[in-house]
Amino acid sequence: MFDIKVTRRNFVLGSLVAGSLPLGSWAAAKGQAQPGSRRPPARLHKLLVDRNIPESVRLGAYSSAVADEVFVFDGDLTQLWNDELRSQWKTGPRPIAGLTAPSVRLVLEQLGRDHDARVVFSAEHRKVADGTRHSLAGSDSLLTSPEFRGSADWVADMAKYVQACPHEPPSRKTMLEYETGERPGEPGNQQRLVTWVLAPIFRLDGPLNTKTMI
Amino acid sequence: MNLPLPPGVSQADFKSALQKISEAIGGRWVFSSEEDVRLYRDAYSPLWDDKDERLPSAAVAPETAEQVQAIVRIANEYKIPLYPISTGKNLGYGGSAPVLSGSLIVDLKRLNKIIEVDDKRHFAIVEPGVSYFDLYDYIQQRGLKVWIDPPDPGWGSLVGNSLDRGCGYTYGGYRDHFDSHSGMEVVLPNGDLIRTGMGALPGAKTWAEFRHGFGPSVDGLFSQGNFGIVTKMGFHLMPQPDAYMSGMVYVPRREDLIPLVDIVNSMEHGGVIGQPRYGSPLQALMGESEFRGSINRRGGITDQELNRAARERKLASWQVELQFYGAPAATEANWAAASSKIAAAIPGARFEVLRRYEFPLTKEQKDALPHKAALGVPDLSIFFVGARSKQSPEPGDGFMWFSSVIPKSGEAIFEAQKVYRTAAWDLGIEPSITPFSTPTSWYRTFILISGLQISRSDSELNQRSRRLYETYARAAAAAGFGEYRAPAVFQDVVSDTYSFNNYALRRFVETMKDTVDPNGIFAPGRGGIWPKRFRERKT
């Protein structure tokens, strides 16, 4: 258990840590539209932090830069669904993100189907011999930009992707794979993890858009 | 990923059909982009990314029974197979994907009205888009004194789970969700709308209470079947009990399971207890590689050796949690009586009180419940408990469930363990069923459930799991244990095991299918029933 003195509703450490990070051009890009995006990236409503996963906790340290609220949990989404999302999503979901076990993304993706929410960015992290392999899927504009990669800690890169990810389904989707080495003193999580952003999609009422038809 | 077209339908015709449907229900509710449609893939498909993966062509989401009727009429005109889902959340049994690739998903999530809930006569009438969470909220917000019986997880639809013959965890017959239904409203393949049971009587006042009505009962045709799209359904609900208590019984020897099951059966069938939850403390030892190796080598170890292992570890061979619902004094008295009866029959039995509650519960009590479904509270925790363990260091991307119906006896548990372990050994696979595996009580029978792992990246693992599933199905049938429910990919395999008198039952149902659905547009292949045009192609 990696308790960094958080409550489920408040996550104060994040603002202190993120304030001292070398964010560079990422911070400057905050709030600006990505090339090809129709809407500028907005802040997330909520960042999910699984207190049992060190990488998730590390992403939580960037919360003040990316999200209005942090939800710290023990791997089980039931309480978040019961207490918040279930009623909130009836009037429309809001963008959320996390670095979690794959089951969390799966459950939210399935629930999102019924509320017009989609996973708009996803990065799978799998332990390999001397590091971590990352398989990303998201908007072309986000994944082709080199400015989001190269931090000493790959979790910091994920924070950049999450922060810059447009909250809409990619008009052009792409895949990206790369590996990062182990952090000194940290063997890396053996468990497969996934960073994801789930966002509402907006549909226009009216006749079927035949351009989307097969 | 290319989306398939409905079989035998040209792209131009399909486009024209979708245009007509969008005029009937609104273009916003016709999903034909790849991004939208791929959300209807079976999230736990054993054919993930395989050329044979069952994929829909598109999806539509009507809001009313009239809109469902309009879709059915258009589908008949173009001979487009429809695959209705309520919420499509039965992961492990096929999810929202169709049996026949190219089917058009009819997603009923927008038919989400709760028509009526009565806490004096204990029933509800709901539409298929109503989830267990939705009905639970409705009841709690109004302070009604009735319980629902959620499955695990509770995110699915009452109608969908019932039609798929799902089960729950509370008390008696409420756990059999199809058995606790009462009356349906159904759109037929010709677009007609019927009501069954007392619902067929205009102005009926007992639609959701007296399921039989008058004349032949046809409700079963719509369960695991492809004869109609259910748009409303009544359910019996359990009255909220005053109190609950549970206690654990431990018995020392392997052979003690036989008298234990017999005694617990009499309590359960007599209405004294809710669902008994069996287990074995020895199962936890399977995390030790040496112990696991000795258990899972072909032939395993003898009952005497298993008894010795339990003795040396000071562990019981078996345990069963007994759950009592009712007045506080009644639950205590029933626990005392049960303990006394078991102690007299099984030397060395031990007893431990686990939990006591009086209702209604506070929010804090509900949040802390170890198994919410047993107290009628829906949750999602099944996705997150034990996801990674010593026994399952890489849990994969999900499971498909093999669920066979076995007699409710200790002897049958031992026999089923042997059947499935032998089947795995025959394939050179380490058995996931152990000598400590216990079934779920389905009121009058047991269901022995095995989760077969699936992967989104390891096609060999999926192939192995598919082979094991088919082997299990045949071995189960040979032993007289039928599979009660199956993922889409295996519905033909399971249907083939129900072969009495040269498949007389299936032939009878196929005859009805060809009459009622001559264009074969309703869920071809569901439940192993194929309409004529696809049956002929299949052969």
Image: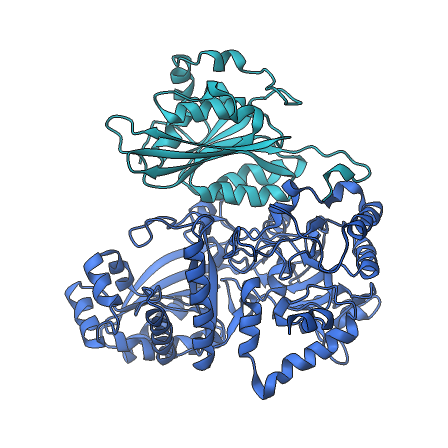
Q: Quadrant of residue A214?
A: top right
Residue B275 percent coordinates (x, y): 45, 67
Task: Answer above or below: position of B306 versus B397.
Answer: below
- Which chain is blue in the picture? B
Q: Nearer the viewer, residue A108 or B145?
A: A108
Residue B48 percent coordinates (x, y): 52, 52
Q: Residue furthest left?
A: B312
Q: Residue furthest bottom?
A: B501
Residue B441 percent coordinates (x, y): 45, 70
Instruction: For the N terminus of chain B, give its image quadrant.
Output: top right
Q: Quadrant of residue A209?
A: top right
Task: Answer above or below: position of B405 versus A75.
Answer: below
Instruction: For the C terminus of chain B, give its image quadrant.
Output: bottom right
- Which chain is cyan in the picture? A
Q: Quadrant of residue B462?
A: bottom left
Task: Answer above or below: position of B362 versus B342.
Answer: above
